[in-house]
Image (cartoon, helix red, strand yellow):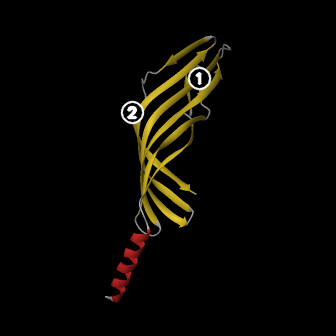
Amino acid sequence: MVGTTMILSATDIYAQQTQTKIGVKAGLSLTTLGSFSYSTLAYDYNLRPGFQGGVFLETPISKSVLFSPQVLFTQRGGNVNTTSARGVILKGSTQLNYIDVPLLVGFKAFPNLTFYAGPQASFYVSEHYILTIGRSTVTSTESTGTIKTNFGGQCGCWL
């Protein structure tokens, strides 16, 4: 009974010293669409910089574990530059916009270092691409063939 009382008292003191945090985050998103082949052309997308920003909630579960749901606007995409067998230059840029909802669990390894991991759902918002073939340029906001909802995971650390 004494051991239980001491644990509950310690938990009460800790709960009073920690607070749930609500915040805004913003940063750089570097993505690529990978590579694929179509007809006689091989497309190899390079990294494309984009914006990522939104809101987060960080609530402690224990002294070293916390839960952090987030809602983020994320720009993804890639840039491509290739030449056909006939010497025609093809340049393109694709931007896909998503709302990402990661549900992360964090482990505080040190006071200023937290490791995070958890599942993420991504919901398609819009897309924009520019394709230049030779001297012709095509711009479109069509979403033909774009996956509307993605599920994955996220991991990383905060300093």
Q: Is residue 141 above or below residue 1?
A: above
Q: Nearer the viewer, residue 16 or 68?
A: 16
**Is residue 84 toward the left or the right of residue 64 in the image?**
right
Quarter where residue 92 is shown: top right
Give the SS element for disc 2.
loop
Which residue is label 2 attached to?
148
Residue occupying image coordinates x 47% and y 33%:
97
Q: Nearer the viewer, residue 60 or 102?
A: 60
Give the image location of residue 29, x and y in percent.
56, 40
Give the image location of residue 19, x and y in percent.
42, 63
Which residue is label 1 attached to?
92
Q: Is residue 104 above or below residue 79?
A: below
Q: Which numbered dot is residue 7?
A: none
**Outermost residue toward the left in this view:** 1
Quarter where residue 80 is shown: top right
Contact between marks 2 and 1 (CB within 8 A): the answer is no
Quarter where residue 94 is shown: top right
Q: CA gap, disc 2 to disc 1? A: 22 Å
Q: Is residue 149 above or below residue 93?
A: below
